[in-house]
Image: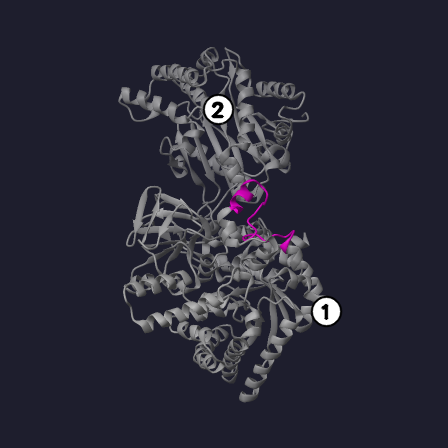
Amino acid sequence: MGGYVYFFAKGCADGSAQMKNILGGKGANLAEMANLGIRVPPGLTISTQVCIFYSDKGSYPEGLDEEIRDNLRKIEQAVGKKFGDSENPLLLSVRSGARISMPGMMDTVLNLGLNDDTVKGLIKQTANERFAYDAYRRLIQMFGDVVLGIEREKFEKLIEEKKKSRQVKEDVQLGTQDLKELVGDFKELVKQETGQVFPEDPFRQLEMARDAVFASWNNKRAISYRQINKIPDHWGTAVNVQAMVFGNMGKDSYTGVGFTRNPATGVKELYGEYLVNAQGEDVVAGIRTPQSLSQLRRDNSRVYQELKEITERLEKHYRDVQDFEFTVEKNILYLLQTRTGKRTAQAAVKVGYDLVKENLINRQEALLRLDPAQLTQLLHPRIDPQAKVEVLARGLPASPGAATGIIVFTADRAVEVAGDGKKVILVRAETSPEDIHGMAVSQGILTSRGGMTSHAAVVARGMGKSCVAGCEAIKVDEKEEEFAVDGQVFREGDYITLDGTEGKVLKGKVPTLKPELTDEFRQIMKWANEVRTLGVRANADTPQDATLARQLGAEGIGLCRTEHMFFGEERLPFVQKVILAEDEGERTKALEKLKPMQKEDFKGILKEMEGLPVIIRLLDPPLHEFLPNREELLVEITKLKILGGNPEEIKAKEKLLQRVSDLREMNPMLGHRGCRLGITYPDVYRMQTRAVFEAAAELTIQGIKVIPEIMIPLVVEEKELAILRKDVEQIISEVMEENSIDFSYKIGTMIELPRAALCADEISRVADFFSFGTNDLTQTTFGFSRDDAEGKFLPAYIERKIFNDDPFQVLDQKGVGQLIKMGTVKGRASNPNLEIGICGEHGGEPSSVKFCHRIGLDYVSCSPYRIPIACLAAAQAKLEEAE
């Protein structure tokens, strides 16, 4: 073993499974199998350090070529063949191998070492001329594609032409002469495309293939895969060079891939595919239709049994499902690779549970192995993986799940069409609170603007509906009720399917699979809840949301947004009367109409969450959101005047326009909203408070235990909260006295502005709890408008690695996180009993949940369908802390 190159062969290896950082996953596992005495083709691994060195300096370490040649001689000794020898040639494969598996992302070259001389030696070795030329044409094809950058399709076209001329359908039906001719055709193609002849020197082939595989670490698909899976660029890849074994030497030779358990369901069975008389890329490329491994049991029971015994041994050794590759050459089995098998969420849960029951791992290991974000697959419908799909466009995966329906372009139309029993997809440029009734009846929501925390995204997640947001490739014309994408036009009545998990818009009806919560899932979640110490609550605005949240394990409601209740068709007119009232009496009258409706809302939610805390946020958004759009009003008034409309109607609309203009703000997010409304329009907050506590009183009298908590939003100054707390407590006292009852309650605030975090020690003196609103806190800390940022420049920031993650999806721990930590420390310094949580969408993102655990928050709150994700992440945080 030298500094950069590591040898392995059956019973002897320089490395081990613990050396993935140096050898990559493939190389480390080949070394481990060799040490276990499993038959692997002898080989060498060029370490990831070489890739890192080359990326930094543009050259290779001194002495690398000598190390490779020294270890190549060991391979020659192990197999009794010589690389480049015309009588007894050794052929090699060159494959990538990062420390974490990146299936199909990087490159492979097989049959290295063949040329016009060594092919003759291969014929002597095998007494099989057809096989030798098949291997030769494969080398030129793969080398041309991977190393020389010639489009694979150009080689395939030549093969198709040859098959057509011979009137055959399969590659295996081509004869020896056909393959000889293809070798010549391929060489001519190489010369045409590159201006150079195909390299005949085996060592030059090896050098070029090595360089190409290292370079593939930075190809487009590998970079994209790393970005999606958050794999650091600086890890690099190893290169594995192995003696070739051949699955294409006749009917007693095979190549295949498999899993020790079914990767889709988790069922314990040998699962996989193989091809007779083929090389490995044939299985992956889909050139021929493979057979199930169950057929191998019938075709060659001895090889099947040996494969079963070895892979079962590997699963027990690694204590996890194994994804393996194998080749059978003349009835001799070789393992080419083993790695931890990727699996669906359903399989991951079942495998974790079963491995505990089989005493291979303990409960803590089972919890730590699960990816919390993957649980989303279990909670929502998903696209049938067997379905053929046409992707129309891609946007942001704003809310997971799959949904199919006919397109509608307005919320009102969604209600009409859904009322006829049809499934609809609401398509908008962007949604607003006025669309809530249409969103509620839609199967999914598609917007061309907006980000991961836009109105459409937040509401859809809360409702558990699929949503693709910010899909700028579609051009929505709401007036013409159509959208265009890539030259196609879609109108109302056309079917589309949304994949909110992947952010894809699919053409037509696509089959979906219903979610199923298994007994294994419930048991895993029980284990997680026994471990975690961080509370998990739900963001829920309706009794239905509250019921779902409780079923999924919520320990209360961390955010009930009262403004969503104001947009109902029967309520909005009264809300508008409150806003347009010219005197206090008129406003009071309208508020009295709203109060019974609000009370029933609160009563339903409090009842569903019996015995658990319910944090109700008083009105937060600016008042203009409840009024008609100013530009649309102007158009209506102009049309009425041109057409000689009713003067009284014109006068009323002009009065409404004046009020809309009065309330208009240049930056409403930082304007007259939240507690500022409570200070200037105290009757609104008083009405809401009375509705909450009258509902609580009625339920208490019925013997139902309720724990209402009032949250006052957008506080930046202790005095704001003190004034509003006094108002709230006065109403509570009145309600208790009127009903001769007493119940517990809390009054707190949402910390969503940097100043509030900085002054947390003062604000906490008049607060029972803090709830960090991380959506707005992120906006105000960064100075970003989230909808504009996610639609305009954040993707470029992430692509150029200015940010590792979208801060609206993953909590910015260095900036926003430090404000939360500071606010927590300062708040508890003044009020040791202060309860603290977060209620932004970060409350359901695993790394953000773990951060909240580490800084000592009491709970996180998230949309109902993200509760299991938060619970598992919280359990993992506790276990990681112990480690």
What amino acid type is highlighted by mark number 2? Answer: Leu
Q: Earlier in the sequence, mark 2 or mark 1?
A: 2
* Farthest residue, direction left: 167
Note whether residue 32 is visible.
no
Q: Main secondary structure of the magenta part?
A: loop
**Where is residue 818 drawn, in percent x and y?**
67, 55
Query: In what element is the residue under mark 1?
Result: helix
Residue 153 counted in the magenta span: no
Q: Residue at x 60, y 80 (%)?
A: 729
Residue extending furthest right? 829
Q: Is residue 34 above or below residue 467?
A: above
Residue 294 in view (yes/no): yes
x and y percentages locating residue 97 in the rendered image? 56, 33
The residue carrying mark 1 is: 830
Marks 2/1 in contact by CB < 8 Å: the verdict is no
Image quarter of residue 17:
top right
* Separation of residues labelled 2 and 1 (CA atoms): 69 Å
Q: Which residues are magenta?
A: 793-816
Instruction: Please name the residue shown 60% across and 32% down the image.
Output: 31
As shown in the figure, which amino acid type bears the numbered disc 1?
A: Ser
Name the quarter where the N terminus is drawn. top right
> Is 798 colored magenta in this rendering?
yes
Q: Count numbered badges in the picture.
A: 2
Circle 1 crowding by C-alpha within 10 Å: few under 14, some 14–19, many from 20:
some
Q: Residues within 10 Å of mark 2 (few under 14, many from 20)?
A: many
The disc at residue 448 is none
Q: Secondary structure at mark 2?
A: strand
339 up-or-down from 639: above or below: above
For disc 2, the marked residue is: 110
Q: Nearer the viewer, residue 609 or 812?
A: 812
Q: Tell me residue 234's x, y (percent).
A: 62, 36
